[in-house]
Image (tube, rainbow, N blue to C red):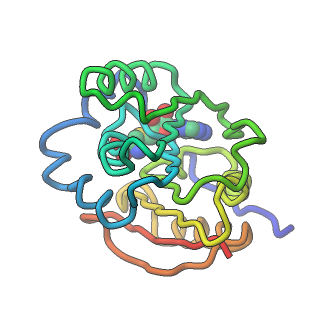
Amino acid sequence: MASTPVRPQHEVFSAERAGHLDTRLRRLLYRPGRLAARYVRPGDRVLDFGCGPGFFTREFAKRVGDGGRVYAVDLQEEMLHILRTRMETEGLISRITTHRCRPDTIALPDACRGTFDLAFAIFVVHEVPDPRRLFSEIASLLKPGGTLFLSEPPLVVSGREFGDELRYAGEAGFSVRERRLFFVNRAAVLVKE
Ligand SMILES: C[S@@+](CC[C@H](N)C(=O)[O-])C[C@H]1O[C@@H](n2cnc3c(N)ncnc32)[C@H](O)[C@@H]1O
């Protein structure tokens, strides 16, 4: 395996600042409902990796319907607690499984392998210590032909670093179907071969 270039150190977004992630302004800028409508189908099994307090999870859960499921995965129990409280209030919790992962592995049960239609990794991969391992775990969780939507903020993740992430994803068996902007952020839609 090729050596990993030295990466800039990025801090984990603290749960103390979770309030900044679920705001009206963010809804206007990112249109999470439109993102969900574009990529998620009713009945899908969706992985929301680095879900935070559930800003995107909410719209994925609305979109999958009662026949689908969203796995909301995060490192910080505080984020998952906020997410559960909000999704209970909004009547969506029955469609969501929350899972606290470790920094270096998603560690979902083996039974989840090859069962997901779609995964999202939005504004999180730069916070993960080993992106190579992350992409290969996501690949193993997706069905063949499954999709990964990846986005990173340009003020935090340089074009070069984003390019490295796409290369690691390629090594894990993904091919790039689309490069796009997600509001002002770099984004790519990848497909598991
Ligand atoms: C900037 S927030 C983005 C949250 C959400 N995707 C959004 O855009 O609203 C990054 C999230 O990734 C989580 N995170 C950071 N490192 C992680 C890791 N190694 N595994 C899982 N989650 C992680 C953080 O706890 C935080 O909730």
Could you tell me residue 72's position as x and y percent?
49, 37
Is 26 situated above or below 164? Answer: above
Is 186 situated above or below 66? Answer: below
- Residue 21 relative to residue 105: left or right: left
Is residue 6 visible in the rendered image? The answer is no
Q: Quadrant of residue 143?
A: bottom right
Circle count: 0
Task: Find the residue positioned furthest to the right.
Answer: 1
Please tell me which residue lies in front, 116 or 108: 116
Could you tell me residue 18's position as x and y percent?
33, 28
Could you tell me residue 79's position as x and y percent?
43, 25
Residue at image location 51% in from the left, 20% down from the top: 77
Residue at image location 41% in from the left, 34% down from the top: 52
Please tell me which residue lies in front, 82 or 143: 143
Could you tell me residue 66's position as x and y percent?
39, 41
Residue at image location 24% in from the left, 27% down from the top: 90
Q: Quadrant of the C terminus?
A: bottom right
Residue at image location 30% in from the left, 44% down from the top: 62
- Residue 119 relative to residue 62: left or right: right
Task: Find the residue positioned furthest to the front.
Answer: 67
- Residue 84 relative to residue 160: left or right: left
Q: Quadrant of the N terminus?
A: bottom right
Is residue 96 visible in the rendered image? The answer is yes
Q: Quadrant of residue 21?
A: top left
Please tell me which residue lies in front, 113 or 53: 113
- Residue 173 relative to residue 121: left or right: right
